[in-house]
Image (tube, grey):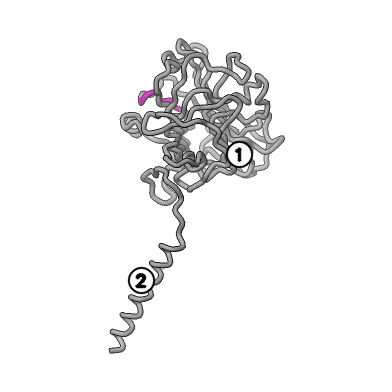
Amino acid sequence: MKKTLYSLLALVLIVAVASCDKKDKPALGDYPTDSNPPDGPLKFYAAFDGTTSNALKNAVDSIKANFPSDNPFTAGAGISGSCVTGVNQKFIKYPSFNTWTASSSMTVSVWFKQDGQTKNNTGGNGPQYIFSLKAAGGYHWSNAVGFFFIEGNNTACAVKSMFVSPSDPANPNSSPSDAWFTWEGGQTIAGLCDNQWHHLALVYDETNSSVKLYVDGVQNPNVKNWGSHGALRLATSKITEYRVGAGPSTGYTTDDWLACSFKGSLDQLRMYGVALSASDIQALYDAHK
């Protein structure tokens, strides 16, 4: 009898807790999620695919339910579902960043569409940023911990990235040291600015300090190297803002190359804390996701 009573009480308690959970847990909004276990390799994912009237919800990082504080970009038809299209001198702003910056390796994956020559914010030729990690004032000459952009036209488009890490791995406050990984000059890429969707993936592998670029699922033959740098070790504490679609500077009304915004369209922006394999990149491209 006593055992039966305890069982009934336990059942009532479970039902009560479940009911409270349903009442107390608010809906986070209508936005897509990506398959990823807790603390899995995918650290940031903005599909830009929300269907609400709230622009902030439509640009949410669905890994951490991290909403931007500002999304002035317009919505349009993406490679899969919706996308965002850049607005001159504006960008999507996330007030903080997540554990991607503490990763040892990384992969950035994004779909973009650009029609012809990339432009600065006053209409001259210049870069267009996919993202930038804005740094605290005075940390680095670029005002950044890292960024990734394209620059050029459909005949010859450069792809450029830069990341900053402390010179002393044991001291995050030591003087910063930057490294550039670029595909420019004789390594520019044709056909990227033809007003069609293209997939870019930037992969840093700590095991050999290599940086690989994939375009539309295919690895570019020019592999870069970060010496014997090893783990990524970006200065997480120095990042004050994560910007999608603009550089880290504040000279929005000038031709400052560090402030240029993205005028084309962006879709399916992912950041992984691991170096994805060639087959992983190919799968992302084939899936159009």
**Closer to us: 270 or 60:** 60
From what the image shows, is residue 251 above or below residue 125? below
Question: Image point 43% across, 63% down: which residue?
Answer: 23
Residue 218 lies, in percent from the top left, at 36, 23
Viewer-side residue, 25 vs 205: 25
> In the image, which residues are magenta?
212-217
Image quarter in which the C terminus is found: top left
Would you name the residue on which mark 2 appears? Answer: 15
Indicate left or right for 221 with 173 as reference. Answer: left
Dot 1 falls on a residue whose secondary structure is strand
Q: Residue furthest right?
A: 138
Between 17 and 167, the residue placed more toward the observer is 17
**Which residue is labeled 1 in the image?**
241
Say if mark 1 contacts mark 2, CB within 8 Å: no
Q: Quadrant of residue 238?
A: top right
Q: Of helix, strand and loop, which one carries label 2?
A: helix
- Left or right placement of residue 257 versus residue 16 in this view: right
Q: Is residue 64 above or below residue 187?
A: below
Q: Residue furthest bottom?
A: 1
Q: Quadrant of the N terminus?
A: bottom left
Q: Residues within 10 Å of mark 1 (few under 14, many from 20)?
A: some
Of tags 1 and 2, which is closer to the observer? Answer: 2
- Which amino acid, mark 1? Glu
Disc 1/disc 2 C-alpha distance (Å): 43 Å
Return the x and y of residue 210 as percentages of the image width and height. 47, 29
Q: Main secondary structure of the magenta part?
A: strand
- What amino acid does circle 2 point to? Val
Which residue reaches farthest front?
53
Is 98 magenta? The answer is no
Dividing the picture into quarters, in which one does residue 5 lie?
bottom left
Question: Above or below — where is 119 with respect to 282?
Answer: above
